[in-house]
Amino acid sequence: MITDEQQELVLKNLCIYTESGITPNGYVAVKGGKIDTIGLMESFHEKDWNNVRVIDFPKGMNLIPGFIDIHIHGANDADAMDGSLNALEIMANILPKEGTTSFLATTMTQDAESIEKALSTIAQYIESADQTGKAEIIGIHLEGPFISEKRVGAQPIQSVKKPDIALFKKWQRLSHNQIKLVTMAPEEDENFELVRYLKDENIIPSIGHSDAVYEQVLTSIQAGVNHVTHLFNGMRGLHHRDPGVAGGALLHSELMAEMIVDGVHIHPDIVKLAFLQKGVNHIILITDSMRAKWLEDGISSLGGQKVIVRDGKALLENGSLAGSTLKMNDAIKNMMNFTGCTLKDVIQMASYNPAKQIGVLDKKGSIAKGKDADLVVLDEKHQVILTICNGQIVYSNGGVTA
């Protein structure tokens, strides 16, 4: 729930990355939580903005749309699977520090009771909590339990289930239709029935935690799969006699590919290979972060499993990667460093593409008149200086008082 009480605000002397291009020296006016005006500084007159808060930035600052993290489990010792409103509030409050202004609360493979509690709680939060002044939960990413036992990764194998339309319908009712994306192993789905159902309901069927061979990937695309969960991780890899899920993701433009660009989940040069093959239009940067993000190294947990976090790397006791501690602002910096791509490119991969993929591009994902004022100011080193969520300053790291 977003209120309409946000103040009128003007940000000026910024390089603005708008939906239509780059404004090298401009200003943005925010009113009622929306982007109201975008203009050049040469046309800006202070007298036109009496009784409006005007923030003047030093040279070299960039204004970009807020990041949209469509795959995030937790942060700051909270997790979407905790099944508590407080956990969701903790996540929503911490994420603007990394420039994330909206996200899909992501569940994981667990027993049905735990999943149902999480789904009901997220639905309650979206509908009843005051989401003003924090990152906005804009839906649910259901990761599992309809996955392959051969590619569980950090998902508990004892809770894996065969794809089940009736069970999914129950869960969607409990979520009040907030499930926007489902990670599943389509080769486990008899006649791709759940895939087809999701497609018909405008829910994204994503191939992930899958052992599908290439031919099964092709058939799943025909059935409606159009998304890949954390490319290269939790899937049959690329082999010269079977392109597998990873090869299918690289070869087919129908598939939008999530990537965890932390330098751990994917080798930097493989990130570059994927970028050169998929291009800026078909990659979404995610964090897949768990509750240890924003905490010191030490012992944490994921789905009831012990996790050891050392040097920012989260591992189960058996050595499997257990999600990440990646922050979105670090993901964009890594992407630029690994591939040589531009800030404009990573904005598309971290803001525009996710908004388009989950159907909220009409109000989020870019800087354009009338869209939600989800805005981030980055300095020359791409550090987050200021974050605005729905027109309200919620985080400041550069002398600007929220």
Image (cartoon, rainbow, N blue to C red):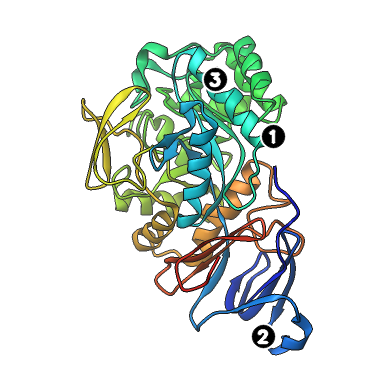
Distance from the alpha carbon under mark 3 to that under mark 2? 51 Å
Residue pictured at 58% horizontal, 39% vertical: 254
- Which residue is under mark 2? 41
Give the residue type that dot 2 points to: Met
- Near mark 1 (Cα within 10 A), the count class, few <14, some 14-19 or many ≥20, is few
The spot of residue 371 in percent (x, y) is: 72, 58
The spot of residue 191 in percent (x, y) is: 59, 13
Any mark on residue 117, and which? 3
Give SS at disc 3.
helix
Q: Please say if 48 is above or below 183.
A: below
Judge from the rendering whether residue 145 lies leftward or rightward of residue 269; answer left or right. right
Residue pictured at 47% horizontal, 49% vertical: 94
Toward the viewer: 223 or 301?
A: 301
| Mark closer to the observer (3, 2) | 3
Toward the viewer: 106 or 249?
A: 106
Distance from the alpha carbon under mark 1 to that under mark 2? 39 Å
Any mark on residue 127, and which? 1
Judge from the rendering whether residue 295 lies leftward or rightward of residue 46; answer left or right. left
Distance from the alpha carbon under mark 1 to that under mark 3? 16 Å
Any mark on residue 164, and which? none
Which numbered disc flags the more N-terminal residue, 3 or 2? Answer: 2
Q: Please say if 117 is above or below 75.
A: above
The part of the image, by quadrant, that contains residue 366 is bottom right
The part of the image, by quadrant, that contains residue 233 is top left
